[in-house]
Amino acid sequence: VTEIALASPRRPRAGLGELLTVFRGHPSLTRSDVAEVTGLSRATVNQRLEALLAAGVIAPADGQAPRRGRPAERFAFNATRGILLLVDIGATGMRAALCDLSGGILQERFTPSSVTDGPEAVLPEVQGLFAQMLAATGHTPEEVEGIGLDVPGPVDFDAGLVISPPIMTGWDRYDIRGWFSRHYPCPVVVEKDANAMVFGEHRLIHPDVANMLYLKLGTGIGSGIIANGQIYRGADGAAGDIGHNQIPIRDDAPEPLCRCGNTGCVEAYAGGWAMVRDLQAAGLAITTVDQAVEAIKAGDPTAVRLARRTGRILGAALSDAVSLLNPRVVVLGGQLAAAEAHLYAGLREMIYRRSLPLATRHLQIIPSQLDRRAGVVGLGYLVADHVFDPVRVEQALSG
Amino acid sequence: VTEIALASPRRPRAGLGELLTVFRGHPSLTRSDVAEVTGLSRATVNQRLEALLAAGVIAPADGQAPRRGRPAERFAFNATRGILLLVDIGATGMRAALCDLSGGILQERFTPSSVTDGPEAVLPEVQGLFAQMLAATGHTPEEVEGIGLDVPGPVDFDAGLVISPPIMTGWDRYDIRGWFSRHYPCPVVVEKDANAMVFGEHRLIHPDVANMLYLKLGTGIGSGIIANGQIYRGADGAAGDIGHNQIPIRDDAPEPLCRCGNTGCVEAYAGGWAMVRDLQAAGLAITTVDQAVEAIKAGDPTAVRLARRTGRILGAALSDAVSLLNPRVVVLGGQLAAAEAHLYAGLREMIYRRSLPLATRHLQIIPSQLDRRAGVVGLGYLVADHVFDPVRVEQALSG
């Protein structure tokens, strides 16, 4: 596998792009540090540092501004020379953020919004939030070096297109990049929501965990996978689709109909929309997933009983995923994750009952620490990695 | 992720190790090719080629032996300066192979053997096959540069240990490397069988497919995963355990007991041992999985009916894995895969019924082309990659 990357004549070795990656991985470095980390000669180090300084992508480190006639000795990635704009587009609301070039979030905005209104309605709303945040922080569109969006549907990551989304009317293959190019002259990254979320949890909370799963329990059910330290998107960007797995329930009730057209899917039992359906059928006056979660947290007996059953159903689906993927950490996020204790008990019960001990011996099942910010946090790192991809940097600086 | 690898000061850039990897990825290269691929100066290229030539790991390419006084112009990885020894240890037999340093197999041996006899009985049998192959090809133990074993159980790959194997009595944490060090002064790689098999199919048959799944249908049921072009082992080497997933069967029969102690596992319906159980219960005089496959292929109505049902059950389990992993290719291997048509019909039926169209639109479900050789073929590439890992080579040549 290594040899495929190396065999490409277009990939330069230890060039400016990779040197910048070294800076992005350290708070600051001296010339000697750079020589040691890269194995480059002192003369080459000096020459490459000059090029990175001239491009403004690194700068003398804090408190180390050069005195007249003496060159700076310590350098750092210049995270403040530009900004990134991010938006996590959910089914019923969107969270936008403005961050520096290292992914550190400086501003956030949330607004209700319906993804089913389609891109021609939703993207202007996104642009409105972006413009507000730029104004609030005194930045201009020219300073935007990258844009990231995540959406609740499958994405062709390389093309930046939403593909065959089950719930996103009008978004199929819509030219999101083209739309933003009217406003910003920079790359646009489009990602599936659960992938952005698992990446945020991975990079900020669990950087040493190479194999993890993020289960998004919202209106629908999806998941994001980190495999061998990378986002795993699968062959068509459809990986992580756990919500339409069938689960073995042995009772006499007919299998519920799912939004996807099949019956008996995990989501048709345990998705937020299914919980609302079941609570309404039991006579509770609720219409939203958040209200269902409130009823559970308030201790309503019907809601609590449903939450426990939902936990067991999610646990049955998750135990299959745990057996297949053997993650070290499973993070539970999304609105339903707030139902915590009642959901978790049933969920853990099923996983430990079903999965083989080797796969669960060191398994952690924990709530999302980033909660509703996971998407924008993950997008920040993802867009930064894209903008400062070594090959891209090399081409920009040597071209 | 890139930055984690780069941040290590111990990883040299574009050194001898990576240069050797470039040679391993090409049939042969001129000095100019090397300069172009690596971006190194001509002087540095000449110096590094000398070091690799002196170590014997590259050689002047065929028909390009240097004339007196004129340096060779074309060089190639020296695959014949040593050999690798490999063995695929199955539940009831083992296949051993001797290959060159590029993974090209030169000799093979098969012998019946019972893995449950434990390592103290099985490893001397392996060593017997290795010694036979060395003698047959005129090689000495000193020429062995790497050894690879795969086993039907979970493996801690870095430690080279079998961990908590359900069916491998006596192998748990047995010091396989220590045992072989008595005979051969070289690295020993231990891998789970389905991982070696999926790697063989990936590298030799589907080198451009970055996401694929190998389903091993033998006495038991397991799988191996290629994710983003790499073997995916999971956090504890337990990934790919699909045989003990529960499948949703709605009938009135009690769920069958599995070897793992649970009931209703895929394997308890569709594993080779379960087919033998069911055919015996139906009055057929068979005792082995191969006999069951023969009965299916001979058109015995009871066996054919069971094969179709087995296909649908495997398809139900596989459709969940396809939804989660979104592979481009699913390869079916193992003894039961020989039951082809009857099995495949039911299997495909369930996958296309259950999985969302995006995940199956370009999906290929195909029989293993390497068949029973997949394990040793995969081990050959795996051991070669390990022996010629850039960091290892760098340390050996510059130490």
Image: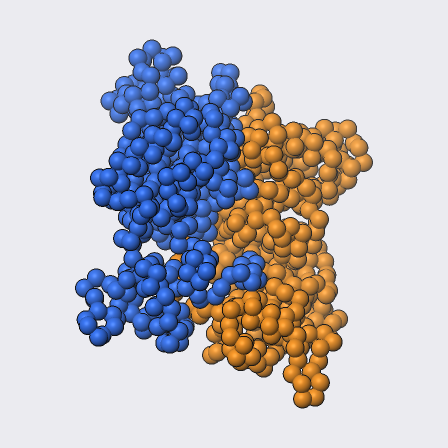
Chain colours: A blue, B orange
The outermost residue toward the top is A283
- Number of marks in picture: 0
For residue B344, side relative to residue A136 (left or right)? right
Residue at (48, 32) in percent of width and height: A174
Is A197 situated above or below B115? above
Horizontal and vertical percent position of residue B295: 77, 36
Taking depth in this image into account, of A376 and A281 the one nearest to the observer is A376
Residue at (60, 79) in percent of width and height: B53
Horizontal and vertical percent position of residue A66: 21, 69
Residue at (44, 43) in percent of width and height: A225
Instruction: Using the rendered image of the protein, determine whether residue B133 is visible from the camera's viewpoint.
Output: yes
Is A97 situated above or below B140? above
The outermost residue toward the right is B298
Taking depth in this image into account, of A134 and A258 the one nearest to the observer is A134
The outermost residue toward the bottom is B69
Is B55 situated above or below B299? below
Horizontal and vertical percent position of residue B296: 76, 35
Displayed quadrant of residue B21: bottom right
Q: Quadrant of the N terminus of chain B?
A: bottom left
Residue at (56, 22) in percent of width and height: B250
Horizontal and vertical percent position of residue A111: 29, 29
Instruction: Using the rendered image of the protein, determine whether residue A312 is visible from the camera's viewpoint.
Output: no
